[in-house]
């Protein structure tokens, strides 16, 4: 094997990058790359002139102060040579230089070895929830028509905000579920109560539909106001269930961090959805069982 180079991706690399995705997920893969966005971190691994790997980091959804490690793929013939690790090291190095405090990655659950989840643990990431049935059409030869689930994993860089000591307003059931995989000390007093001068704002994400298969809807509820109890109760009546928690991801109008509870509503399906196809690291087995029971009850 000749020397492997990791460098910035350029527009001319896009066909080679998309070939990696279609080779891994099939030609119907719905998230092919269209452009190289200069506001993101986009890296490729090359052997000679051949693209053998790709990885990027992007702003995480609605939360401009949080970044996500995503898009990591390495050609099967080049796995086991440390390319994925090199991608992660370089992306984290750049994000630290940029002053990013909170970093997210959504690790896949369709493989029994949970390799992507275990890899993130090596870099200090911890699991903060499961995102059930989020991507409508990934790995159909493994999952059939069931959408792909992901594990929400988070690490704090540069002294990230974490939970702080903000008061959390949680129903007992949600608190119990979170205590299955989060240190109890994060969810107990002493508290500082935040005074909100404006109504809380929910961040909603409608499920994607690909090839006629729909993914879950998600909503993030601010947890540091007593209103959150009523909001979560209403959302549960609408079919939403606990997915995880986002510590310090939200912001007040004055810029102070707030915590969010992420809820999901599973897609309507003519075939039963099952957590048997959701493989997670040991730290999340209790949450997986909790989510499976909630799905059965629904």
Image (cartoon, rainbow, N blue to C red):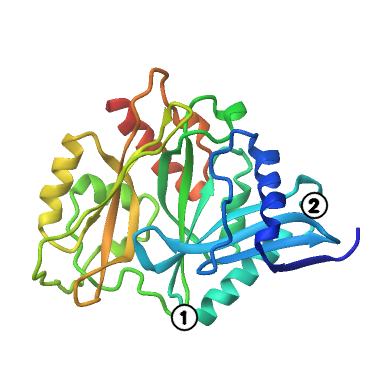
Of helix, strand and loop, which one carries label 1? loop
Q: Nearer the viewer, residue 243 or 88?
A: 88
Label 1 packing within 10 angstroms: few (<14), some (14-19), many (20+): few
Residue 248 picture location, percent across and down: 31, 67
Residue on which the image places disc 2: 78
In the rendered image, the vertical position of residue 175 relative to residue 234, given as above or below:
below
Residue on which the image places disc 1: 99
Residue 154 picture location, percent across and down: 45, 62
Q: Nearer the viewer, residue 72 or 210?
A: 210
Residue at image position (10%, 48%) is 230
Judge from the rendering whether residue 182 lies leftward or rightward of residue 86; answer left or right: left
Judge from the rendering whether residue 224 lies leftward or rightward of residue 295; answer left or right: left
Residue 36 picture location, percent across and down: 58, 61
Mark found first going from the N terminus, 2 or 1: 2
Q: Is residue 29 visible?
A: yes
Residue at the outermost front position: 12
């Amino acid at each position: 094997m000749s020397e492997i180079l990791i460098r910035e991706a350029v527009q001319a690399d896009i066909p080679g990058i998309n070939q990696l995705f279609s080779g891994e997920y099939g030609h119907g893969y719905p998230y092919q790359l269209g452009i190289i966005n200069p506001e993101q971190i986009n890296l490729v691994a090359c052997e000679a002139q051949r693209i053998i790997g790709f990885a990027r980091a992007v702003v995480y959804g609605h939360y401009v102060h949080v970044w996500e490690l995503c898009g990591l793929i390495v050609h099967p013939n080049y796995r086991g040579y440390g390319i994925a690790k090199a991608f992660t090291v370089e992306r984290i190095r750049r994000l630290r230089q940029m002053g990013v405090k909170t970093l997210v990655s959504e690790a896949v659950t369709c493989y029994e070895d949970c390799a992507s989840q275990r890899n993130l643990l090596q870099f200090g990431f911890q699991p903060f929830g499961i995102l059930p049935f989020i991507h409508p059409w990934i790995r159909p030869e493994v999952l059939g028509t069931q959408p792909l689930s992901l594990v929400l994993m988070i690490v704090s860089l540069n002294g990230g905000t974490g939970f702080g000591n903000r008061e959390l307003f949680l129903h007992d059931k949600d608190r119990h579920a979170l205590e299955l995989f989060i240190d109890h000390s994060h969810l107990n007093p002493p508290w500082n109560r935040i005074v909100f001068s404006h109504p809380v704002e929910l961040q909603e994400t409608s499920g994607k539909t690909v090839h006629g298969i729909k993914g879950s809807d998600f909503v993030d509820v601010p947890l540091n106001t007593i209103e959150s109890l009523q909001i979560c109760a209403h959302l549960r009546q609408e079919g939403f269930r606990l997915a995880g928690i986002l510590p310090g991801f939200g912001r007040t109008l004055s810029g102070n961090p707030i915590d969010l509870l992420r809820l999901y509503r599973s897609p309507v399906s003519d075939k039963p959805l099952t957590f048997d196809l959701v493989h997670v690291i040991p730290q999340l087995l209790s949450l997986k069982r909790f989510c499976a029971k909630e799905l059965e009850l629904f």
